Amino acid sequence: MSRRRVVITGMGTVNPLGHDVASTWAGVLGSKSGISVNELFDASTFPSTFAAQVKDFELADHIDNPSEHRHAGRHCGFALGAAREAWEQSGLDRCDWLDRRRLGIYLGSGEGSLDFDNFTSLMIDAWENGRVNTGRWAELALKRMDLHREVEQESNMVVAHLARQYGVRGPAFNVLTACAASTQAMGESTWQIRRGDADVMISGGAHSMIHPYGVTGFNRLTAISVRNDQVETASRPFDMTRDGFVLGEGASVLILEEFEHAKSRGAPIFAEILGYGASADAFRITDQDPQGDGAAAAMRGALADAGVAAHQIHYISAHGTGTRQNDEVETKAVKAVFGEYAYKIPISSTKSMLGHLIAAAGATELITCILALRDQILPPTTNYNTPDPNCDLDYVPNEPRKASLEVVMSNSFGFGGQNNSLIITKPPQ
Amino acid sequence: MPMTEEEVFEKVKETLVEALGVDDEEVAPQATLTGDLGAESIDFLDIVFRLEKAFNIKIPRGELFPDNVLNDPELVQGGKLTESGLSQLKQRMPHADFSQFEQDPDVNKLGDLFKVQTIINYITKKLNDS
């Protein structure tokens, strides 16, 4: 028996370049930067004073019942906005026979934010002789802790809010494998449908770490760019002058659907998911395996699952964070998998414009892959001016490029060594 | 400091608008917290927390919204409150209006006892007693 085929019937996104798919794509093709000085908190004394922020987002502009989600975290609001766009685009809002028990959700969503001011003031007030006096802490925290903020910082909350919003009664999951999360979620959603556990899956991811704790953590790890004098062009994947990724935020949601189910309701079909590969580095926490074996294994896994040969891949949407290490290791891994053909495949990183949306990165980048297939155009890697001898492939510098595309790959690698690759193709005829 | 019932209502209304994200006009005295205003369990805890701050009072656990009523077999049988259950609940909730509920003390309708007026009665009494 042939395998159940999985297609994408809806897309939605809220990110630093736009609050929907159309404006995001216009931004990408216009080589725009979503990066600016941090306005979410005063970061003027931080090593990194800037970020890729979602600006002017109002949940009420996206859904009719914002008060039902009034306690939702910042990233969850983005996800509700993205989900509505995807849901309506797929026509599921008009499908009166949809079996909710066959509708599942699998997100790669990040944790919410800490109730920073409240938490800090509690710590200060309970501080005694160089440590937190837990008795005093309990006394104060029981009086002052915000219940909703406490609940909503759990990483499964976005799943809960979206399930409620769309009446999801089937399987529900969240995976939080750092920067690989939403790519992994879409790969695992594909398997939910292939296995027959669901006919429709809401997938994607959401994350916002642009808060004092998140920024300090990445600064301490020296993972993010400190190019405070040129913030708009600070994200420089594969460029010799790259000095780290730019922290971003946002959400992207995709509707994955079994092909016959989609056809039977006349749904728009944007792409087919052909293959998914996953691997672990089993190396260090914040260093990738320098040989790129884990990354290569994920790409090979996706190729094998898709049943396509390496030379059939026409474009790779790179993880391409703009850290010294990732871009070099990813380049090495692509060469290991594709051999001499690696020099002929266009590879780009839209993180140069979007920033790094962490858990939401993979889903947002897959949307750009789907639109690249649709419009037969390659998104660029912007801010690429100085070649690095260790990164010597075709990174589609600075301007989008016309191309003939059938099958494309998207990579995501996470801190801790989780590697995921997806392969998609044009809608089945 | 004693307040009039009208003053208490205004402050309760403010609290509920903030806690439940509802509109001013939805917070009528006869509105039920669960049915009309969409409160869920976490909201009951949040409301108590906010009332304590708004009125600068201490609300002991279970006093405004009693808990542990439903798991005593003496008090609940076949999904309905027994006579002793009903009288115990009345004792614990002198601030609630039982006239409708006691005609059919179905535990599923227990939520209807928690109206905006119930909170107003409780707070008014609390302030006047202190």
Image (cartoon, grey):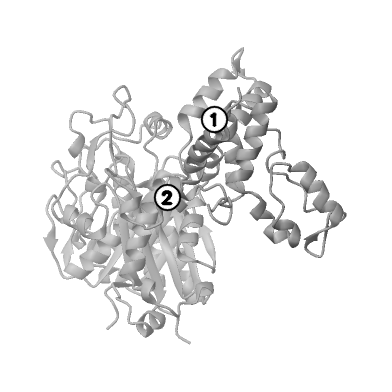
Residue at x 45%, y 61% (from the top left corner): A165
Place of residue A47 in the rendered image (x, y in percent of width and height, measured from the top left): 31, 26
Name the foreground residue: A398 vs A388: A398
Vertical comparison of A339 with A407: above or below: above
Can you tell which of label 2 and label 1 is closer to the viewer? 1
Secondary structure beneath dot 2 equals helix
Residue contact between numbered discs 2 and 1, judged by CB atoms under 8 Å: no
Image quadrant occupied by the C terminus of chain A: bottom left
- Residue located beneath label 1 in the image: B54
Place of residue A297 in the rendered image (x, y in percent of width and height, measured from the top left): 41, 59
- Residue located beneath label 2 in the image: A76
Q: Which mark is residue A428?
A: none
Place of residue A136 in the rendered image (x, y in percent of width and height, measured from the top left): 65, 21
Count all numbered tags in the image, as a single digit: 2
Name the foreground residue: A267 vs A204: A267
Place of residue A75 in the rendered image (x, y in percent of width and height, measured from the top left): 40, 47
Tell me if B16 is positioned left or right of A312 in this view.
right
Q: Is residue B117 visible?
A: yes
Q: Is residue A423 visible?
A: no
Say yes or no: labels 2 and 1 on the same chain. Answer: no
Q: Residue A130 appears in which quarter of the rendering?
A: top right
Give the amino acid type for the residue marked by disc 1 in the picture: Ala
Tell me if A321 is positioned left or right of B120 in this view.
left
Q: Residues within 10 Å of mark 2 (few under 14, many from 20)?
A: many
Residue at x 13%, y 57% (from the top left corner): A400
Name the foreground residue: B99 vs A63: B99
Chain of the residue that carries numbered disc 1 in the rendered image: B
Name the foreground residue: A187 vs A78: A78
